Amino acid sequence: MHYRRRLRSRIIVSFLLLGFGLTAAFAVATVMLRNRLEGSLVDTWLQSEATNFLEFKRANRDPNGLFKFRRQIEAFAYRPDSPKIPFSWSGLPRGVHDLREPDDSGRMREYKLAVEREPDMVTFLRYDYSQEALTEQQMLYALGAAVFLFTGLAFVVGLWSSRRVLSPLTDLARRVEGFSSRHNPELLAPHFARDEVGELASTLDDYASRMTRLVTRDREFNADVSHELRTPLAVIRGAAELLLANPDLPDKTRQRLARIERAALQCTDLTTALLLLSRNERGNGDTNLFKLCNALAEANRAQLGGRPIQLVVQGREDVQVDAPEAVLSVALGNLLGNACKYTSEGEVRVIVEADRVLIEDTGPGLSPEDAARLFERGYRGSGAGGTSGGGIGLSIVRRLCELYGWTVSIAPRPERGAVASLAFNVGDPGPSYSSQP
């Protein structure tokens, strides 16, 4: 389907259809015109000769004579009640008829028979046009060969002309491909003439300039915000740690301070992840998945609000991932936070495997529509209900997976709830995300 939509293929197909249509129409018109003219001329001529022959026989008073005008024409004259009239001719009315009869050698031949009837005499002119039928067949073969010849010629012309016509567009496409690898792409318009392609190149230059400024401003803004937020977040965390070090704090105050410390840590991890996304670069690290999952589970236990949910972490304790702990904390924290948010009772289980982390819950599950759109920015799903959030958490997870070449998926469990999977592709085949495993 992709090749059929290309402009070059459209030009080639157009030339093919044009050549075939013209030659085929010419061939059909030639055959129809030949048959029409030949039939009209032969019919008129034969009927005229039949009348002339009748007058000739009357003048010679020999109604049973046989007279041959030429090799292909035979003339016969009989009395109306003569038994010598061939059986197939006896009932023919006046006019010209097409017959197919065997000759003396038994070979089938095609004839035109002109019949002229009078009360005292009937005459027949038989015209053998087998040779003309053979000639017509040969002409059909020749016309068919001409159709294929002209169609092939049209294809060659279309191929050559499309290459010439589309060479500027091909050059333009090749130069546009280099945009993605350059921060300041080279101008296109100076390389092309002032024609349609040149106008398109100039328009692309303007569009690329606007997009470059927009992307640069967006990256600078994200980087500045992420950088500037680190200092106040560090102050908040430091102050919370100092306050928590006081052994005389009431339990409720200590819980609130611990919550402030966790929120500050989450914001710090989020700013680090957003900074990497804005720069489109990967950070390195050596993060232990099991320890990180335990820390995230402990942070979510404090936010369950008394709901009867058992939060369990199990699996391998020696799995290391080459990525910053902040990035993994944001990705796994969003998946685990969603599982805890939509589970009212039961269990949320985190399973650490050699190349992935599975998060299973016993919540209400998700519909096929939600499963297909969960990672879209701003989509919260039909099961969100009155829960807070802007629907961008899983979108951030998707972008992180695209950056690191991981695979994230969320799908309903057969029995109840949903299962989220974050796989760390060892071979790094490229970015991937899905709503289903």
Image (cartoon, grey):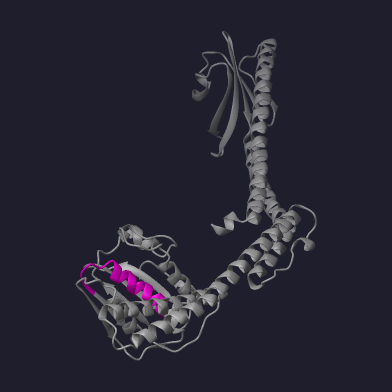
* In this picture, residue 347 sits left or right of residue 82: left
- Nearer to the camera, 187 or 336: 336
- Tell me which secondary structure the magenta stretch mostly adopts: helix
| Position of 371 relative to 100 (above/below) | below
Q: Quadrant of the C terminus?
A: bottom left
Q: Which residue is at the far bottom?
A: 318
| 113 with respect to 231 (left or right) | right
Q: Position of residue 66 (x, y in %)?
A: 64, 22
Number of marks: 0
x, y percent for residue 214:
62, 64
Residue under the image location 70 percent in, 10 percent down: 59
Q: In the picture, residue 30 is in which quadrant?
A: top right
Which residue lies at the image location 39% right of the left edge and 61% below the top edge? Answer: 373
In the drawing, does residue 235 fall left or right of residue 95? left
Residue 88, image x, y percentages: 50, 25
Q: Nearer the viewer, residue 35 or 282?
A: 282
Residue 186: give x, y in percent of width and height: 73, 68
Along the viewing direction, whichever of 419 and 348 lies nearer the viewer = 348
Figure check: 406 above or below 216: below
- The reply to whether residue 425 is visible in this rendering is no
- What residue is shown at x 65% (from left), y 48% (from top)? 14
Specify start and end residues of the magenta stretch as a single range. 329-347
Residue 341 counted in the magenta span: yes
State which quadrant residue 169 falls in. Answer: bottom right
Against 377, is 423 above or below? Answer: below
Whether 182 is among the magenta residues is: no
The residue positioned farthest toward the top in the image shown: 119
Residue found at x 56% / y 74%: 223
Q: Is residue 344 visible?
A: yes
